[in-house]
Amino acid sequence: MLKTTHRYFTVAVSILLASLTAMSPFAIDTYLSSMPAMAREFGVNINLIEITLTIYFLGFSVGNFIGGPLSDAFGRRKIALLGMLIYGAAAGTIPLCTAVEQIWVLRFVQAFGGGFGTVTAMVFIRDWFQGKQVARLATIIGMIMMLAPLFAPMIGTALAETYGWRSIFIFMLAFAALLFVLFGMLVPESRAPKLLSRSITPGQFVEKYRSFFSDKKAIYLLLTISFSSAGLFTFITSSSFAYIEFFSIPPTVFPFVFGANILFNVIISLANTVFLKWFEPEKMVRYALAAQFLAGILLVITALGDIPSFWGFFAGIVVYIGALGMIYGNSIALVLNQLPQIAGSANALIGVARFVISFLAASLPSMFFNNTLIPIGAVILGCAVFSNLFFGASQRTPSLQRIH
């Protein structure tokens, strides 16, 4: 097991924590191009296959909600390893399903395990580091994490073309198993032993969240992150329809178009780690949120056109997702640096809010499905409007606690 003083400690744990966080992008993005084929096999409309994504958002939220306080009480490492086991077991069972409803149930379970694992990733960093270093490492992890949706559709398409869509879930099982072994061998517990109560009562569980909600600034930042991310997941959920069915992109080409949408996020994330040397996180979040708002307007204008432009839609998505590279890590660092004593619970709430709001937002295009891009563009623009409003409110609100 690596010691925190080891020369490669930061590099190794950043890669492993990014891999831990990447479990959910793999669970979401690897089978996007296979959705039409899954719909045909199960004899259902594609919107019922899209529900397997929105259910994942819900299960992930529950896993975050429960896993955060448990990681404060029992340690980050135990909860992360347990999450990998649950995630892998559920993924490995999905290929045996004979009805789409069975997949819905197992996706919830898989997401619950993914939530357990992911909720610990950022608080490992907060336990070991402070200040701008948290923002820098959170951004690096976010950048590495975004490589998962960059390559996941390519991996998924290759597997589906060769072995069928069920092999994609076997891949998820193998990924979780390998990560479990490496994580167990290399990553130490980050929470100080004196802070581990090794028990938690319902009252203590609620109290940890009550402490968070006593800080209005933290709440506004939470909602900023959540609505900004909800726009991304709205696109991901609807991307198969938008690109394959609406714009007639071949399934074999889909991974490259989808990956190009993600690539700008990786570039902006890398730039963000440099900009942190000169600018405060708040300023970068403000500019990135403004870019998302403009991207949302472009998407709506494109969707309302008589013949919607592929390049207009593509550009709007690229800018929206790219801006997240400057929003996600900085915003999370702002929250965790304010509330280090309940970092696990605070990060859990971020995960819960992100995926509950994403679940609701991403469900809207399916509910108002009309074979156009209008519901997708409208929801993404709405997410951008709300995230800008909440961030503005956070800047006008003094925090009750702040760590410099």
Image (tube, grey):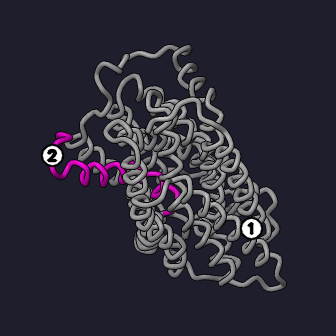
Q: Quadrant of residue 235?
A: bottom right
Q: Which residue is mark 1?
A: 377
The mark found on residue 6 in the picture is 2
Compared with residue 191, is residue 377 higher up or lower down, i.e. above or below?
below
Magenta segment, which residues?
A: 1-29
Q: Is residue 13 magenta?
A: yes
User: On the rendered image, what quadrant is the N terminus found in?
Assistant: top left
In this image, 285 relative to 303: left or right?
A: left
- Given residues 140 and 204, the one toward you in this image is 140
In x, y percent, where is residue 289?
A: 63, 60
Q: Amino acid at mark 2?
A: His
Q: What is the crowding at mark 1: few (fewer than 14 residues within 10 Å), some, or many (at least 20)?
A: many
In x, y percent, where is residue 4?
A: 20, 41
Tag nearer the camera, 2 or 1: 2
Disc 1 is placed on an element classified as helix
Compared with residue 130, is residue 149 higher up or lower down, i.e. above or below?
below
In this image, 272 relative to 300: left or right?
A: left
In x, y percent, where is residue 323?
A: 56, 65
Q: Amino acid at mark 1?
A: Gly
Q: Quadrant of residue 349?
A: top right
Magenta stretch, main secondary structure class: helix
Disc 2 is placed on an element classified as loop
| Chain-order first, disc 2 or disc 1 | 2
Q: What is the crowding at mark 2: few (fewer than 14 residues within 10 Å), some, or many (at least 20)?
A: few
- Answer whether residue 156 is visible to the viewer in this image: no
In this image, 158 relative to 98: left or right?
A: left
